Amino acid sequence: MPKTYEPIATTTLTSAQNDITFTSINGTFTDILVVAFLKLSNNANSSVGFQVNSDTGSNYSVTRLQGDGTTPESGRSSNVASGNFSGNSLRVADSAGNFSPILFNMMNYANTTTNKTFLARGNNASAGVGASVSLWRSTAAITSLRIFPVVGTIDTGTIVTLYGIKAA
Amino acid sequence: MIGNIVAAITDGGEAATDFESIATFTSSGSTRQIDFTSIPGTYQHLQIRAVFNNPTAARNVAMTLNTSVTSTRWHYLFGDGSTVTAGESTQNLLTVQDGFSTTNMYAMVVDILDYANTNKNKTVRTLLGYDNNGNGIVQFSSNLYATTSAITAIRLAIADYDWVNGSRFALYGIKG
């Protein structure tokens, strides 16, 4: 019987990687919350995307809201090959010693009735803040999650943890 | 809050009690109002995690506390994929809607901080998102409920039509 809020898996990078993938995510929880403290390779100037269940097709779409310290902006991407993990399209932390905190909610991820909605919040003190919602147009239960930068690599010291949240 | 949750998970390997599921409502398609009642005052904060939609039309969600306390001030910031809007209202609303669907759900996380405190008015914060591959919305908002009473009941409702089958509202208690 799962606990209400339980760590499922943690990855801490000891070397730079092109991506981070969690597999065999079991369906016993209601939501998955991914808590990340993430840095990209120096001067990558990139946001971070995600794919689930190894789906690389144009089955994702994103709506975002963000501010870069000067201008608030809302944008959309439809029929694209990945969702948004970092909570906005701004650059994730990519300078020495700086990491971006990211909260990524996979809501009702194991249900087989509806398409999947993801809520993300991300911050980089040097670039901006924002939130995004992504849609994966599939009713399949989610069993894997791949996180990857649009440009560059995920740097040493990045820690990503999956928590399972179980509703009554 | 995240720090408290992490601490609970690593505390001696016992079953986590600092983030607890209190109650869950799942709609079968014939509900437009849900009530959480008899909420115990033993937690520090409450969180509602929800997925929902309406099969017929976009309808804003209202939240009422303790059966009669409505929001007296609502501030919101939302983006619809092209325009950013900031506003405020005295209406008793929690969400802005942009579209409806039977297969794509709104996702919402609502935090009610210090809900059992009898010295403070209640402040609620909401993060909402909906994407329908061509339309959608992301929303930050906060609501003021001008009551110092401890919160023992929460009602979430839409004005008309019912929530789509599979809409789910889960209430969690978070200990301090």
Image (cartoon, rainbow, N blue to C red):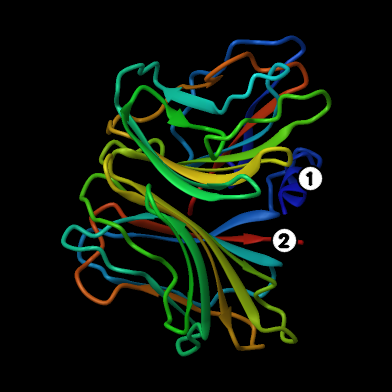
Same chain check for tags 2 and 1: yes
Q: Which image quarter holds the C terminus of chain B?
A: bottom right
Q: What element carries label 1?
A: helix
Dot 1: few (<14), some (14–19), or many (≥20) neighbours within 10 Å?
few
Q: Position of residue B67 (x, y in %)?
A: 45, 86
Q: How far apart are marks 2 and 1 (CA)?
A: 11 Å
Q: Residue B13 lies in what quarter of the image?
A: top right
Q: Eyeballing the image, is B160 above or below A133?
A: below
Earlier sequence position, callout 2 versus callout 1: 1
Name the spot of residue B95 as percent of width and height, x first: 41, 66
Give the quadrant of the N terminus of chain B: bottom right
| Looking at the image, residue B13 lies above or below residue B85 | above
- Specify the amino acid type for callout 1: Ala
Which numbered marker is on residue B7? 1
Query: Residue most toward the front?
Result: A70
The residue that appears at 83% across and 27% down in the rendered structure is A97
Residue B92 position (above or below residue B21): below
Give the residue pinned by disc 2: B175
Q: Is residue B131 above or below residue A157?
A: below
